[in-house]
Amino acid sequence: MSTGVNNAEPRRILVTGASGMLGGAVAELLRGKGHHVRTFQRGASSQATDEIRGSLTDKDVVATAVQSMDAVIHLAAKVSFTGHWNEFVATNIDGTANLLAAAKSAGIKDFVFVSSPSVAHFGDSLTGASAGIANPNLARGNYARSKAAAELSALAEDSPEFRVAAIRPHVVWGPGDTQLVERVVDRAKSGRLPLLDSGVALIDTTYIDNAASAIVRGLERMDYAHGRALVVTNGEPRPVGELIAGICKAGGAPAPKLNVPGWLARGAGSVIEKVWLAAGSRNLVHDEPPMTRFLAEQLSTAHWFDQRETHEVLDWKPTVSIDAGLAKLAAHYGQL
Amino acid sequence: MTELFPGVDGIYSTYLEVPSTSKVDDPGTLHMWHLLDNEDELLARGIEPIGTLVCVHGNPTWSYLWRSLLNHVSANALPWRVVAVDQLDMGFSARTGKFRRLADRVNDLGDLIDSLGLSGKVTTVGHDWGGVISLGWATSHQDQLANVILTNTAIHPAGFELPAALKLASHPAVHGWGTKTTSAFLQVTHSLAQPALDPEVRKAFMAPYTSAAKREGVANFVADIPFAEDHPSRSTLNEIAQAVRTLTVPTLMLWGPKDPVFSDRYLRDLMGRLPHAQVHRFEGASHLVGEDKDIATPMFDWLSSNQNSTNSSRADSLVDYRPMLSELDSRTADHSVAVVDINPPRSLSWSELGQRVNALAAGLQEIGVKAGDRVNLLVPPGIELTTLIYACLRLGAVIVVADAGLGTKGLGRAIKGAGPSYLIGIDRALTGARLFNWPGTKISVETLPAAKRKLLGVEHSLSELFDVGNKLAPQASNFEPAEPDADAAVLFTSGSTGPAKGVVYTHRQLGAMRDTLRETYNLKAGSALVAGFAPFALLGPALGATSVTPDMDVTAPRTLTASALADAAVAVDATTVFASPAALANVLDTKNSLDATHRKTLANVSVMLSAGAPIPEPLLAKVQELVPNAQVHTPYGMTEALPVTDIDLAGIREAGQGNGVCVGTAVAGAKVAIAPIDSMGIAGDQPQYTPHVTGEILVRAPHVKDRYDRLWITEQVSISIPGWHRTGDVGHLDDDGRLWVEGRLGHVLSTAKGAMTPVAAEHAVESVSGAGRAALVGVGPAGTQAAVVVMETIPPARKAGPASNELSQKVRSAVAETGVDVAAVLIVSSLPTDIRHNSKIDRAALATWATATLAGGRVRKP
């Protein structure tokens, strides 16, 4: 086990998407290990010393970003439950292709593509599942489909000279998380958070610190990880209702009481998603819809993973348990 | 390599031109045969076969039926040539335009085998009418024959009716239409598969029979069934049926008992003709047994075990063999009480019991019951059952004891599986026998009115048998003593782990069971025991102990009340009480009904025994209050070995808490060892005694079962470590040689942290306030299972679902101390238990339920 320990020569590492919770955590961890980190994102990143601002769709900016770097950790992506397909293609597929091409021509050695287990989920429940092969045709929702295509194209570039590994953290949460935690807490506070099928589906999640350390290990263990896609979780599957109630409690919100059958939510999710998209295109709403078919599937079917390969390849184990993570979250919200 | 049909590689398909010597053909006729043959594959691999399997399909299938055999040999590179033939006019072999009768077909098979030019010997494998044809060749070529393997077939014995379904198929009004004009006969046959055939496989079975012309053979096959005495093939069939008795080669029969045509009765008939055959009945499988179950693995395992015979050693008896009846026979002049019934009240002295046993034995003998015959006893515990048991043992007849606790379906399966020649039952049992067509000549316990007797097909009553027997006034010396190593009894497992299994004991093994009980619990002449636990209750007269059956519904142990138990104790001034844990729980619940006499009598009890499932210390401590001067014992054992170990309350307290239930040390004459399990939960095959190593519990004792009944595969697994019985339970030994049971092998969780047994974690859950009983089950694939707690609460939850976060947290942290990370905690109103003991939690069912629940979707009841 070597997380948090600087066991390598300092390297020059580009981290894309560093303005997000996970990207920020990865950049901070790398810096803590004595590496030189350059960040690349659209807006300003809070911790930046060496930063490039811009879009992945801009090839010139991308070429500048990779210059004089040794390695890339690519987290930048359009992450949303809804949205039009061409937006996902531009950022997730074309943007990744731009970065891969630039990195290769700049002579970069190692490339970690941060992906999602949803690239290999096809809507069925997953119990102790292995990572599986990404499939853009079968993955559910535009985000997963575009990430699947991008992961395939990234892994296809893997060679002894340009090593590529895909790390797929599953449902990352923690203090400062706007994707899951804030939504859950906000909706619970306003009474808009239903539980599907009593919330019994068993799901894996990943506490932010563990996700960040696993991604960094992906780079450190590139000798073994390259060419592979590795799912990363806390290795503590929990009933989804219990997790959400735990997050609500930490965030000072009441636990959800409304119980909705999964089939109803999936059907309703499809409808709401379409209405929301239409409304969004006319600038009527800016938020994510309260329920999408993808989200309904995520919350009503089991998805937890076999972590044995990940632990072995990365020589890594999560260090923050779910309970410890919830305590940190509560501290963050001042609920302790 | 290309697949010709699903599961059949093209390289196996071959054609061979064979000169015919069959009477139906003109001299010089050649026929083109289609075969599936692995000869080329063996040659290519340089494997020299040690023998050839010639596999003969029935009607209306083809060699496709045997593809799993070819694939098994290929996958395991075994040295066996497999030739699966398509009979002429069938499959892809020639359509000869002749009506081929049984004699022709047997001869055809001989022509084919001659043309194969085999060097080694032949093992015949047959199914359906292919079984008969293969036996026809086998019986007339014994010099070339190595083994005989049969799957659902019939040799059509004289006196047996044709199966109704076949009669219908051969009826003139149905025959042509059902078999040739349409493909109805094919479709019906294929629909017999359990579970249903894959559509692609069904298509493959249909492939050679796509037109009426191609189905001519199917029709002729049915028309050639010799249902009438004057049928042209009848004499051939009779000859084969007789000749089968001359076969001495190793024989294996693999059977699907759900076959509506070739049912168990034909298996029994064949077993009578081939008494040396080894038999496995696949409970739940039907006519196409090779489609329903993996028959290839056991078949080739059996073939290889035939090549190098093994001899399994059994533990030596404690003492010299004493027949089960010796105690009874030594007390012909003893007028003290031997057996007592409470409801209705009745008792017999030793002298009377001995006389009645002999009279009944003589009566049974008069109606033809003889040594080796199986007699099914569907009679509740009490004097009548005791008399019947010892009368059968006297005759050397094999008692089949299946109790109603198995449920009607389980009971029916058990009885059909054991296939008794006689069925002796109370009114209700005979009604079931009639309704569900249970086998055996029917004998009623009660004397029934003529109409009812006729309705139930009853041929004799016990009172008639007693009358006949009493007139003969037999003495013990009138009967030939039973062979010590002949079968004496078939008992049944509880069925908590799948269908109940028949377990065969010899007279010597029953005697050893009696001796072990005597030694372990200090039972002797003068002891008086309350028999509230069925298997041991049968042993009272053999032990020389007075025994009393309390007033209770034996099918539901929880109906035993404290006063019923105490009444029974008072009736014999009991020294010893046998009961089951479920019964004891109810006894404790009703203990306020006890009066002063009851309490005084119970205070004289010196041994209290709770058998059937491990019993926790708190419950046992309460039992101790009931019988203050008794040693309270709880043995560990199973239908296959009763008992294995024993512990008393003091011993349990001394052992304290640990990983599992401490069940004490091996009983007199028994040895216990452990076969350690690996990280996937698989038990090895090296017995060892190292403390604190978890593995499968192994037993060696003179009172271990002789074998499983008609379950050859199960038997092979249970004796795969020579000299030991694999119990299927897991546990470990401690530093003092005590055995701790940690659950069933099938209940071991295979998590990413390694194999884990559930019992310690379950105890941890049960220690949480508000918790009832709990079960720890694994969800997900072996090697990375998630540990899930399914628990009852106090008070019980109204419906099943996830536990509250608070309870989940408490349970999780309690269980974490046993080294198990709990993923989810589910609440149920009541955990499912097996019917018989009402004490063994059905973890397999729970694991299935938890898997479905945690996959998402609506929460149903377990």
Image (cartoon, coloured by chain):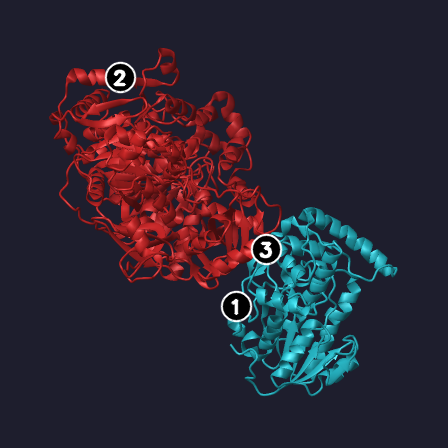
The chain displayed red equals: B
Specify the label residue B463 is tagged with: 2
Q: What residue appears at the point 34 percent right and 15 percent down from the top-left corner?
A: B448
Q: Is residue B45 left or right of residue B788?
A: left
Q: What residue appears at the point 72 percent right and 59 percent down from the top-left corner?
A: A141
Front residue (pair B595, A311): B595
The chain displayed cyan equals: A
Front residue (pair A170, B68): A170
Q: Amino acid at mark 2?
A: Ser
Q: Secondary structure at mark 2?
A: helix
Q: Quadrant of residue B464?
A: top left
> Does residue B598 sit above or below A139 in this rendering?
above
Q: Nearer the viewer, mark 2 or mark 3?
A: 3
Q: Residues within 10 Å of mark 3 (few under 14, many from 20)?
A: some
> Does residue B541 sit above or below B623 in this rendering?
above
Q: Chain of mark 2?
A: B
Front residue (pair B437, B81): B437
Residue with the mark numbered 1: A309
Q: Is residue A19 left or right of residue B838?
A: right
Q: Chain of mark 3?
A: B
Q: Secondary structure at mark 3?
A: helix
Horizontal and vertical percent position of residue B778: 49, 54
Front residue (pair B216, B816): B816
Q: CA distance from mark 1 to mark 2?
A: 72 Å
Specify the label residue B805 is tagged with: 3
Q: CA distance from mark 2 to mark 3?
A: 65 Å
Q: Quadrant of residue A252?
A: bottom right
Residue B489 in view? yes
Q: Quadrant of residue B460?
A: top left
Horizontal and vertical percent position of residue B367: 24, 20
Horizontal and vertical percent position of residue B606: 24, 40
Q: Secondary structure at mark 1?
A: helix
